[in-house]
Image (cartoon, coloured by chain):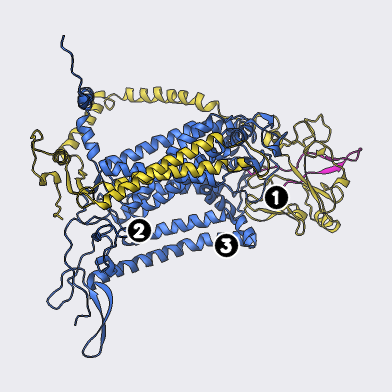
Chain colours: A blue, B yellow
Amino acid sequence: MKRRKFDLAQVPANVGKGLDDRYKAATPLRGLLNKVFPDHWSFLLGEIALFSFIVLLLSGVFLTLFFDPSMKEVAYDGAYPALRGAEMSAAYESSLHLSFEVRGGLFMRQMHHWAALLFMAAIIVHMARIFFTGAFRKPREANWAIGVALFLLGFLAGFTGYSLPDDGLSGTGLRIASAIMLSIPVVGTWLSASFFVGEFPGEFIIGRFYILHVLLIPGGLLALISVHLGLVFAQKHTQWPGPGRTNHNVVGERMFPRYALKQGGFFMAVFGVISLMAGLFQINPIWLFGPYRASEVSSASQPDWYVMFMDGLVRLMPAWQIDIPIGDGYVIPPLFWPAVVGLGALTTVPMFYPFIEARRLKDKGSHHLLERPRDAPERTGLGAMSFTFFIVATLSGGNDVIADKFHISLNAMTWAGRIGLVILPPLAYYLAVRICLGLQQHDREVLAHGVETGIIKRLPDGRFVEVHQPLGPVDDHGHPLPLDYAGWVVPKKMNRVGALAPAIKGFFYPVEKPAEAPVSPGLPPVTAREEREEITSGR
Amino acid sequence: MTVIQDGPHGAGTEPVDVNDPRLSRFDIVREGARRDDIEIVTYESQFQGTNSKAERRVVRNIAFLFLLSGAGAAVFLVFYIVWPWEFELGHARSDYFTPILGISLGISLLALGFAILSWAKKLLPHEVSIQDRHDKPSSDEDRLITGQTMAYLVDELGVQRRPLLKGAIGLGLAPLGLAAAAPLIGGLIENPHKDAEPMMYHTGFDPVPNEGKPVRLTREDGSPIRPDDVSVGGQITVFPGIPHGATNKYADSPTLLIHLRTDDAAAARSNADTTNKDAMWGNYIAYSKICTHAGCPASLYEQQTNRLLCPCHQSQFLITDNARPIFGPASRRLPQLPIEVDAEGYFVAASDYRETVGPDFWERP
C-alpha cells in the first residue's frame, strides 16, 4: 500500500476546501474581509459602549456565582466587624461576602459597576455624535430609535443592578421606585402591589429584579445591540465629506488587515481603563451604607449618574397636586409628572426626531455623508438645548451636595434649577445657532479670500492691507476664484496649508529624514507634494 | 488622486486571471477587492525601503509593549496569589490588594491595546480604499414582483372573499391570545384592596391586630419609651411595639417623636386642625417619618426652624403647623400620630394614623 504523503503546508488549504464544500463560505467571507470602513475618531464612541457591555457580561456572570437574590433575614457573621450581628437580607450579606471574603471579588464588583457607568456615558456621547452630525437621517432612522431604546434599557439595567445589593442606598432607590409606581393614576396601587407582591418592600422584589437584571434586560440589550450592529454593517457606515467621498461610496480601510486590528487594540485599551478604574477608584461601598431600613437614610443619597437627571427633575418639580373631586376624591401626585411622564417622553419622543426633521425639511433623500454641526444650525441648537436641559437636571440631582460643599442655600439651589431649566435651554439654542452661523460665515470668508497670512502689506498710497493666501486658483488680477464649500474643514491657518515645516520624527533625536506633511488630517498623502514658494510680502 | 465617479469602482481596474502564476498575492487580493466593487487607491508602506531604521524602531516599541503587557499580567498573577487579601480592620496590607490588581491588570491590558494599535497604525501600510455603497433600492420590477407575490398570498388565502373566515379568525384567535397572556400576567397581579383593611391605610400602630390594645412606641430594639427619655428639642425614631415592628415588614410605620420647646408646642397645638386635634401629648408630637412625596425617611430635623427635611428630594415640612409642606416637591403634609402615655408611663399610640401614611396615590381618600 502506498503511504499517504502528509504535507503540513497544505493543511490550511485543505481545511479551507473542506469548509467551502460544506458551507460555501469563500465568497461571503471575501466580502467580509474586504469590507471597507471609513475612519474617524468619533466613530469609536459607540465602540466604547460595546466593549463596556462585553466587560459587563463577563464580570456580571462572575458576580452571579456568589450573589444570593433572597430577602430572607439573616444575622451577619462575616469578615466586616462593624456590621457583625446586624440583621440583614441574604442579598446584602452575599454582597458583603463577595466584597470581603472572595479573592478579587471587590475588584470584580467595582469593575462591573464602573463598566456600567462607562457604558451609559459612552451611549450618551455616541448619541450626541450621531445627533450633531445628522447620522440618524434616512436610511438610518430605525437604528437611531434602537439606540434610544438601548439607552432606556441601559438605564433600567443600571437601576435594577444597583438595587440588588439591598444596602441602605438601594433600598431607598426601591422605595422611590415604588412611590413612582404609586403615583400613576388609576393603576398605581395595583402596579406597585403587583410588583412588590403586596406592600413595599415585601419579600420578592430582589428576586424579581435579579431575573430582570441578569436575564430579561441583558437579553433585550443583547438582541438590540445585535440588530444595531447588523444594521450598521448592512447599511454601511456614514462618512465625513472629503476628497473622493460621495454619497454613493465608502472611503476608508478594508476590514483586514488594519481596521479589525485597530478595533481589537481599542477593546484592550478600554478594558485596561476599566481595570484601572476598578482597582483605583472605590465605587458603591455598600458596607458603609448598612442594610436597608425603611427608617434610615443619609444625606447625599444620589443614584448613579445616568439616573440623576430624573432625580433632579423630581426635585425641581413644584408641589402641584391635582385633585379630582369625584366620589371620595382622587389625586394625581406631583411625582407623576417628572418621573413617569417626563421619563416616558424623554425616552420616546427622541425616537421620532429623524422623521420630524425630515418632514420639516421636506427631505426624502438618503444621506450617507455626515453634516458638520455648523451646517445644520437648528439641529445643533436643538441638541445644545437638550444637553443644557440634561445638565441642569443632572446637577439638580446633586443639588444638596453642591449646596453643602459650596455653602449655598439648598432652597436657592432648587430655585436656580427650576429657573435654569426654563431659561437656559432656549438660551443655549440661541447661542448655538449664532455660533454655527458665525462659523459658516468664517468658512465662506476664507473660501472667498484665502487664509490670513498675518503679513501686512503697505500699498504705495499708504494704505495697509493684509495678504491672504488663496486656497485655489486666482484670476488675472490675482483675486481668488470663488470656491465651493465641500462640507468639510476649511483650512484657516497657514500651517494647515503647508507653511509649517514637516515635523521631525523621534523623541530625543531625529529618525531618518523628516516625514512628509500630510495633505489633510483625515487622509494620508496620495500625490506628490507641490513645490512651495516662500510667502513674502510680495516685493 | 483619481477622479471618482459614481458607479462600481472595481470597473476602473481591469479584471485579471487569478490563475496566472505571475500574479503576486497582492494582485489576487486586489482582484478580489475589485470583485467586491472596491478600488484600493493607496496601499503603501509607511517606511522607505525594507528594514529601515524607523521601522526597526517601531518594531522595538511594539515588542516592548507586548513584553510590558506580559509583565503586568505576571505582576497581577503573583499579587493575586500571594498578597494578603482578607479584610482586616484598620490600615492593613490587604487594603492595597484591589488597587494592585487594578493597576497591574490595567497596565497589562493598556500595553496590549497600544501594542496592537501601534502595530495596526504604524507598521501596517497606509490604505485608502473606495467601496461602492450599493445604496440603491431594489429595482422597480423587483418591487413589483415582491408586492404582487405578497398580494397573491393574500388572494390565495381568500380572506377577503370569505368574510366568515375573517370573523372566525378574529373570534378564534383573540381569546387564544388572551388565554396565552392570562397565566403570564394574571399570576402577577395583586389586589391592593383585597384585605378587609387595605394595606395602604394601616400601619403597625393600628390597635386592631394588637388585640385592641394601644400599641406602644418603641425603639429599634423594642424597648418602650418614657417621656423623660426625649430631651427638650430632641427627637427619636420610634416603631410600633409589636413583633417585627422595627423591621421592613412595617416599612410605613417609622415615626418621629419630637419633644418640642414649650412655645413651639403651644404654636403646634394652636395650629392643629380638626384632624390633628388632641393628637399631641404634652409638648410631645409624633409625625410619620415616611415622606409623603417618594417615601424616603424625612429624617433631617432642623431644631432651630422646626422643619423636617427629606434628604432625597428636599421636601420640607413645618412641624409646628401640622407638618405641612413648605418647600420642595411634596404636596401633602406628614400624617400625625395621636399619642398618649399609658398607665405604666410609656408612650402609646392613641389610635392608628388618622391620615394615609406614605407616598401619595390615586385613590387616597
Q: How many neighbours does mark 3 have within 10 angstroms: few (below 14), some (14-19), or many (20 or more)?
A: some
Q: Quadrant of residue B142?
A: top left
Instruction: Report the disc number at residue A416.
Output: 3
CB atoms at circles 2 and 1 under 8 Å apart? no
Amino acid type at mark 3: Ala
Q: Is residue A486 left or right of residue A436?
A: left
- Please, which residue is most extreme toward the bottom here? A461
| Left or right of residue A121, residue A261 in this image | left
The residue at which mark 2 appears reads as A507
Q: Which residues are magenta?
A: B332-361
Quadrant of the snapshot with the C terminus of chain A: bottom left
Give the class, few, some or many, for how many residues have Cα within 10 Å of label 2's Cα (few <14, many ≥20).
Answer: few
Q: Secondary structure at mark 2?
A: loop
Identify which residue, A199 or A140, lies in the foreground.
Answer: A140
The mark tally for this picture is: 3
Amino acid type of the residue tagged 2 in the rendering: Phe
Q: Are marks 3 and 2 on the same chain?
A: yes
| Most common secondary structure along the magenta stretch | loop
Q: Residue at x 38, y 42 (%)?
A: B66
Q: Position of residue A508 (x, y in %)?
A: 35, 59
Q: Is residue A355 visible?
A: no
Tell me residue A387's x, y (percent). 45, 56
Distance between the alpha carbons at the discs numbered 2 and 1: 69 Å
Q: Are marks 3 and 1 in contact (CB under 8 Å)?
A: no
On the image, the x and y values in percent for residue A211 come to: 52, 30
Q: Nearer the viewer, residue A232 or A178?
A: A232
* Residue picked out by circle 1: B333
